[in-house]
């Protein structure tokens, strides 16, 4: 059992390392720049970026601030085992927005939240995500329509 837990922690550390390096590369930042922005000595930053040691949530948030990325997206990516999840949240801050929205709701309703049955959460979240998906579909269709209407004209207008 201990071996299995340590193996999972090793995999988590490897994934964290991949995520941090990808985001740093995406932002065209050196390790020194990120370390300085996080207020860490370079060696300490390298240890963090390597994924060694205990998971440090505060450092993940400092990394998010230093790189303009989504720290909650990084944490969720570790829970999901998905590098792609972290990268999909870098620009739009989707995971942080989702958490902040839920936190605001929870503060507003307080202990009454314990009376909400799971099916109502499922329904509410499904509606929200279906709405986002519909918005994306409309954007995609609009872009496809514009390309279909305008690209052929360019080809025919060329001498």
Image (tube, grey):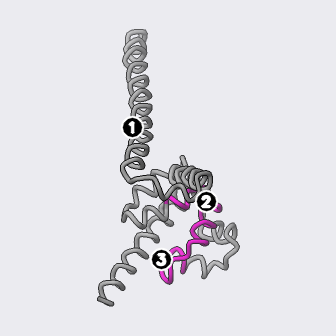
Q: Which mark is residue 130?
A: 1
Give the CA separation, mark 1 to mark 3: 35 Å
Identify whether 159 is placed above or below 29: above
Asked whether, in this view, residue 141 is left or right of residue 32, the answer is left
Q: Quadrant of residue 36?
A: bottom right
Of residues 12 and 143, the one drawn nearer to the viewer in this rendering: 12
Asked if residue 136 is positioned above or below residue 8 in the image, the reply reads: above
Q: Which residue is drawn at 67% across and 79% down?
A: 41
Q: Which residue: 43% across, 62% down?
A: 77
Image location of residue 25, percent across then percent down = 52, 60
Residue 21 is tagged as none
- Residues in magenta? 47-73
Q: Which of 151 and 131 is in front in this view?
A: 131
Please state, as top left, top right, bottom left or bottom right, where the C terminus lies in the image: top left
State the SS at label 3: loop
Q: Name the residue under label 2.
A: 67
- Which of the labelled discs sits on residue 51, or is there none? 3
Find the distance from the CA under tag 3 to the CA under tag 2.
Answer: 17 Å
Q: Where is residue 121 in the image (x, y as percent from the top left)?
A: 42, 49
Q: In which quarter of the image is the N terminus?
A: bottom left
Q: In this view, does 41 lie to the left or right of 83?
A: right
Q: Is residue 75 left or right of residue 5?
A: right
Residue 7, placed above or below residue 126? below
């Amino acid at each position: 059992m201990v071996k299995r837990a340590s193996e999972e922690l090793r995999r988590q550390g490897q994934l964290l390392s991949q995520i941090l390096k990808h985001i740093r590369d995406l932002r065209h930042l050196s390790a020194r720049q990120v370390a300085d922005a996080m207020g860490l000595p370079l060696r300490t930053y390298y240890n963090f970026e390597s994924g060694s040691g205990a998971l440090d949530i505060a450092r993940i948030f400092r990394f998010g601030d230093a790189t303009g990325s989504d720290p909650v997206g990084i944490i969720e990516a570790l829970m999901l085992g998905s590098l792609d999840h972290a990268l999909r949240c870098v620009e739009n801050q989707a995971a942080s927005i989702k958490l902040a929205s839920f936190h605001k709701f929870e503060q507003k309703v307080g202990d009454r939240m314990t009376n909400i049955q799971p099916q109502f959460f499922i329904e509410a979240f499904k509606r929200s995500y279906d709405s986002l998906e519909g918005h994306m579909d409309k954007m995609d269709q609009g872009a496809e329509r514009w390309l279909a209407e305008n690209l052929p004209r360019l080809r025919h207008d060329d001498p």
